Each structure stands twice: as C-alpha cells, then as structure tokens.
C-alpha cells in the first residue's frame, strides 16, 4: 500500500512516502509544459507568494525568448543577426549566450541552438499536426550547407554580432534549465531552503524534505509510467529529454523534436536521456546533446561536457548507464528494463 502511494506521488515528480508533513505544491503552465514547484519549509501563504513571483518571471522569459514570435528579445537578436547588425543585450542574456556557446563546443555542436531555421523547417513550433508533412531533403541540405554554429557569434561585453546570417537562435533546449536555475536563486532570496522546481520533468532541488534527501521520479518514455526513482542532494538537477514529449506523425512514422545537427533529421535511436548535474542550463543542454549522441557516442560527449551521471534508453527499450548513475537509480517499473552498464570514457 505504501509502495502504491509512493508511486502515485512519484508521477508528479516527487516521492513522499512516509509520515512527514506534505510539502506545499503548486502547478502552472508555461514554456508549453507544466511547471510544478514544491516547497517544504515555508507556510502556505509564503510558499504561494514565492511561486506566484516565479510564475511571472517564467512568463516573461517565455515571451522574451521565443525564437519565432515577434516582439521578444531573442527575436530581435535573430533579426539583427539576419541583417548582419550588432545588438546590445542585457547581462542575463550574454551569460546565457556564453554558456550555450561553451557547451555547444564541448558537445561537438550536437547541442546547437543556432539551428532554428532547421527546427522551423521541421515545423516543431506551431505547425498544425493534422496537416503536417516532413520537409524535403533538398531544403534540409540547403540549410545544413550554411553551417550555422554558436561559434559564429561574437560576444563583446554586452554587444552581440554574427558573421553567419544563417544563424538563428532557438533556446528551446536550454531555456527551461536556465529558468529553473533562476527560480532556485529567487526561492533562496525569499528565505526558502527546501524546494523542488520542476519544468516538465526537468528539475532541480534545494535542501531536503523534512530532514531526508528529496526523492524524485524519472519519467518513462511511454509517457505514462515512472521509470525510476533517484535521491537528489542540495542543488542537483535531474533533466530528461525525450522524443516522446513532442513529435509529429506522418504515415505512421514519428518525428521527434530533437534534430541531429549533422544530418538535419530528427533523432530516432534514442527515446530518452536523463542526466544529473548541479546546473540546470548545462543539464538541459547536455540532455539534448546526449539524445543526439545516442548509444554510439554518449560516453564521449558526456565526458567532454563534464556530465557524471547519464541514463539513456534506446528505441528497443534497453537502458545504458554509467556505473555511477546505476548506483543511484532504483527502477520502479516491473519488470525492470534490460540494462547495459558502460563507463564514461577517460578524458
Ligand atoms: P524538452 O524541451 O522536451 O525538455 P530538449 O531540452 O531536448 O527537450 O529541447 C528540445 C528543443 O530544443 C526542441 O523543441 C528545439 O526547439 C530545440 N532543439 C532541437 N534539436 C536541437 C539541437 N540539436 N540543439 C539545440 N537545440 C535543439
Ligand atoms: Mg535540453
């Protein structure tokens, strides 16, 4: 019975299976997903007020960082790049640009937020799923030939400019992680020490749950079950990327929303990637990069990006993990999936 209760709570990202007081929890919709904030160490009124502030912040970030919607700051940056002009941005944005560029390079550009034209071509933002068809190979190759990369962007103080007019930014793979980082900072400023901020299965924790480590669930790529549970310590993030969340279907084939920047086609061999890392923006970038890297290259790319805990599920349902991750993961599905344990490659 206790086990069943744990699992029910686990679906919402949190396992609270004992007699501790129930933490305060609220949800809201932003970034096209459900954001859930759990606070263990504040009365309801204080917790609620802090959550409302974060909701407003997230809404503002969503409006500013839309790659394809006019009016936001990122859309202005993209317009300036297309015209070959320099643009001045606030320090928050230059920080995000630097991190994104750094980790794009470390991922061998498998995480490549400069490929917004390619993502638009695949219609992952706003296309009507009922009438959607895949783009032509010609159109894909034409965009690939322009080699848009984060390293085409020059950052000088607050000024950004770009040598390649094909660079168009989409921060969809990193924005949620960055937002979760800012939310944790905000909670701490409000005097909150024990909390979880979860943006659509991408979460970070601070402190603990009434004297015990937070335990959270990793979603099964089938979208229904919880694959595994893991204990997380102060500051750690658990980030999951998967094609099951957003995809198009055409003639019985699924096209996931993560694009391999080398081929221009959606990733189809990896159905889910989970990383644990104490920074949301980096964990988010890494989860996307490792989804692209797939079973053949995840160890090398994780190593290059400094990620020490990885779980990958391939299209056959086999789970690949490094031994450090395997030590932390407790499967909650019965029977557990087939597992292959492989070390991260030496540096
Ligand atoms: P989720 O949003 O489900 O957590 P991700 O973090 O993997 O998933 O982000 C996927 C989003 O990132 C896509 O919707 C798209 O906007 C963008 N994207 C797709 N492929 C790449 C890539 N190779 N590099 C950077 N961004 C990508
Ligand atoms: Mg990501």
Image (cartoon, rainbow, N blue to C red):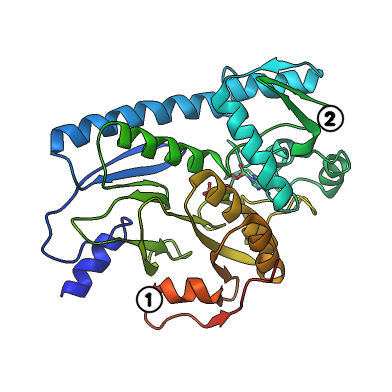
Q: Is residue 166 left or right of residue 176?
A: right
Residue at the spot x=49%, y=47% of the render? 279
Up-down relation of residue 289 to residue 83 (above or below)? below
Count neighbours of disc 2 (C-alpha within 10 A) and say few if under 14, some if 14 to 19, many if 20 or more: some
Q: Nearer the N terminus, badge 1 or badge 2?
A: 2
Which residue in the rendered view is the most extreme toward the front?
347
Q: Is residue 199 left or right of residue 167?
A: left
Up-down relation of residue 109 to residue 76 (above or below)? below
List x then y, in percent, for residue 20: 12, 59
Count neighbours of disc 1 (C-alpha within 10 A) and say few if under 14, some if 14 to 19, many if 20 or more: some
Q: CA distance from mark 1 to mark 2?
A: 47 Å
Q: Which residue is mark 2?
A: 164
Which corner quadrant holds the C terminus?
A: bottom right
Residue 254 in sight here: no
> Of discs 1 and 2, which sits in the foreground?
2
Element under label 1? loop
Query: Does the CB distance between marks 1 and 2 fall below 8 Å?
Result: no
List x then y, in percent, for residue 217: 36, 63
Residue at the spot x=20%, y=48% of the render? 40
Quadrant of the rendered structure where residue 35 is?
A: top left
Q: Is residue 130 left or right of residue 163?
A: left
List x then y, in percent, for residue 282: 56, 48
List x then y, in percent, for residue 85: 78, 16
Q: Which residue is mark 1?
A: 333
Residue at the spot x=66%, y=70% of the render? 295
Element under label 2? loop
Up-down relation of residue 45 to residue 314 (above or below)? above
Q: Is mark 1 within 8 Å of ligand 1?
A: no
Q: Toward the viewer: 225 or 306? A: 306
Quadrant of the rendered structure where residue 300 is?
A: bottom right
Q: Toward the viewer: 251 or 28? A: 28
Which corner quadrant holds the N terminus?
A: bottom left
């Amino acid at each position: 019975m206790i086990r069943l209760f744990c699992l029910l709570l686990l679906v919402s990202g949190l396992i609270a299976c004992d007699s501790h007081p129930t933490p305060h929890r609220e949800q809201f919709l932003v970034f096209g997903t459900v954001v859930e904030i759990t606070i263990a160490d504040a009365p309801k009124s204080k917790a609620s007020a802090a959550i409302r502030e974060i909701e407003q912040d997230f809404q503002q970030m969503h409006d500013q960082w839309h790659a394809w919607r006019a009016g936001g700051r990122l859309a202005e940056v993209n317009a300036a790049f297309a015209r070959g002009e320099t643009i001045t941005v606030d320090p928050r944005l230059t920080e995000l640009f630097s991190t994104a560029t750094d980790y794009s390079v470390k991922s061998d550009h498998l995480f490549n937020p400069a490929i917004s034209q390619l993502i638009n071509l695949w219609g992952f933002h706003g296309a009507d799923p009922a009438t959607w068809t895949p783009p032509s190979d010609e159109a894909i190759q034409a965009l690939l030939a322009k080699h848009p990369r984060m390293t085409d962007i020059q950052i000088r103080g607050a000024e950004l400019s770009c040598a390649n007019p094909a660079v168009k930014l989409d921060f969809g793979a990193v924005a949620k992680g960055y937002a979760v980082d800012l939310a944790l900072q905000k909670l701490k400023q409000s005097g909150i020490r024990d909390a979880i901020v979860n943006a659509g299965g991408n979460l970070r924790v601070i402190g603990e749950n009434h004297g015990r480590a937070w335990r959270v669930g990793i979603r099964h790529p089938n979208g229904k079950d919880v694959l595994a549970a893991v204990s997380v310590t102060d500051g750690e993030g658990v980030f999951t990327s998967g094609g099951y969340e957003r995809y198009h279907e055409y003639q019985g084939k699924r096209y996931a929303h993560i694009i391999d920047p080398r081929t221009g086609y959606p990733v189809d061999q990896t159905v889910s990637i989970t990383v644990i890392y104490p920074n949301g923006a980096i964990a988010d970038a890494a989860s996307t990069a490792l989804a692209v890297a797939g079973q053949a290259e995840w160890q090398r790319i994780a190593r290059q990006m400094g990620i020490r805990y990885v779980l990958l599920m391939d299209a056959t349902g086999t789970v690949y993990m490094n031994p450090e991750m395997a030590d932390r993961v407790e499967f909650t599905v019965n029977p557990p999936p087939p597992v292959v344990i492989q070390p991260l490659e030496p540096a």
